[in-house]
Image (cartoon, rainbow, N blue to C red):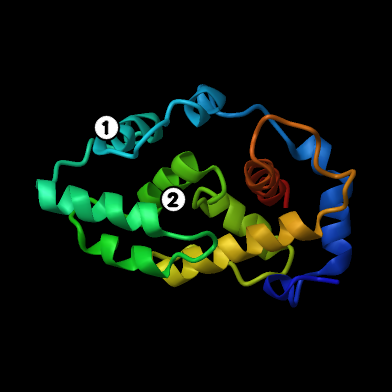
Amino acid sequence: MIPVALFGIDVEMCEEFFERFQELLGPEEEGYEAMLYRIEGQLDMEHLAIIDEWAGYTPLSVHDDVAQEILSILEVSSYPDVSILESLLTIEGMDINRISHWLHFTTHVYPIWNEETCAGLRRLRLNAPFEDHMAAYGKYVEMIEGIKEHAPMEALPESPLPRQRLLENALAEWSRRA
């Protein structure tokens, strides 16, 4: 049974994607696996600064009250819901990509917002816009989760990396080979 988030998917194209999955997996970004294990303990702004540095963002400089708001929202967010994160977009220097990196490395379940991965989803005939609003990211999260649930057991290799990360990378490569 196809998950609701995948309604409209090109089933034949999806089967081809999973048949080619292993060849679509390329090398992971340098330092990614180590980054997965750098964020431990009670979440604080220093953790977010470490993630920002790895992702290439200028460190975020905010007042203590704004920092507490950011940390509180990240701590109460509940996968796969992203609606509570919308208010973070009002903070100067904030965008969905930064938030998605924070969520990914602090929870290991949220996917990282990626234009090429969205293009890979569109190649499967899914409506995956890469637009700067939280609803688009929410839809992206649901689609990645749907594909993760729908994946044939033998398609996804045993890996220390989160399954959604493997899917993101393979979908991005899938988009480049279109």
Along the viewing direction, whichever of 170 and 64 lies nearer the viewer: 64
Which residue is tagged 2? 100
Residue at 66% of width from left, 27% of height from top?
Answer: 27
Q: Is residue 62 above or below residue 11?
A: above
Image position, residue 48 (x, y; %): 32, 38
| Label 1 Cα crowd, 10 Å radius (few <14 / some 14-19 / many 20+) | few
Precedes in sequence: disc 1 or disc 2: 1
Along the viewing direction, whichever of 80 and 58 lies nearer the viewer: 80
Residue at 15% of width from left, 41% of height from top?
Answer: 61
Asked whether residue 133 is in view, the answer is no
Q: Is residue 26 above or below residue 34?
A: below
On screen, residue 81 versus residue 22, left or right, reads: left
User: Amino acid under label 1?
Assistant: Glu
Image position, residue 97 (x, y; %): 40, 51
Along the viewing direction, whichever of 115 and 113 lies nearer the viewer: 113
Choose top left, top right, bottom left or bottom right for residue 2: bottom right
Badge 1 marks a residue whose secondary structure is helix
User: Amino acid under label 2?
Assistant: Ser
Badge 2 marks a residue whose secondary structure is helix
Q: How many marks?
A: 2
Image position, residue 36 (x, y; %): 51, 31
Which residue is tagged 1? 46
On screen, residue 139 versus residue 66, left or right, reads: right
Mark whose residue sits in front, 1 or 2: 1
Mark identifier at residue 115: none
